[in-house]
Image (cartoon, helix red, strand yellow):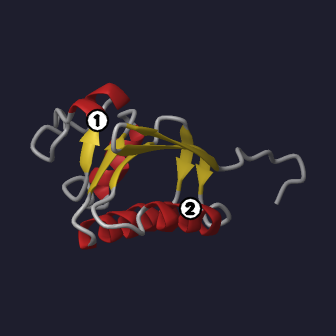
Amino acid sequence: MDDNHTRSVAYHTARTDGGTTIVTLHGEIDLLAVPALSAALDALTADAEPDLVLDLSPVSFIDCTGLSLLCRAHNRVRSRIGRLRLVVPGGGFLRLLHCTGLSGAFELYPGLSEALGSKDLWGPTCLAVA
């Protein structure tokens, strides 16, 4: 690997709005970042009926382990009769979800206000991916 390679270190911020926990993921969600992020999301989805919004707008890169992290969070939330919404900026990330067959697995929203307002603007039938 090139010694001059810089990577965007993944981190997250979390806050609560009403009964909804909003987690904003930042940086690169990859093999190196997933263990710490997984532990944080596991803690946030441990209780019954979690209501979680993951804002992926600041994410600069996501690999298959990052997608696995999202699927794990989705499965944990569903098993606890909760709700998980993803805020995705569009473009490449939507294309990735579509190509992997995951676009229909998540509630997808173009912005945080839409996710909190529960308007499903990007369902699987509305995805226009080039």
Give me the residue at 51% from left, 65% from top.
43
Question: In front here: 24 or 68?
Answer: 24
Question: Which of the two labelled residues, at mark 2 and mark 1, occupies the earlier sequence position?
Answer: 2
Q: Residue flagged by tag 2: what amino acid is it?
A: Ala
Callout 1 crowding tier (Cα within 10 Å): few <14, some 14–19, many ≥20: many
Report the disc number at residue 115. 1
Local SS, label 1: helix
* Residue 25 to residue 83: above or below: above
Asked if residue 85 shows in the view, the reply is yes
Question: In front here: 38 or 80?
Answer: 80
Give me the residue at 62% from left, 67% from top.
31
Q: Residue flagged by tag 1: what amino acid is it?
A: Ala
* Residue lying at the far bottom of the rendered structure: 79
CA distance separating discs 2 and 1: 21 Å
The x and y percentages for residue 78 are: 25, 67
Residue to which mark 2 is pinned: 40
Question: In front here: 109 or 14?
Answer: 14
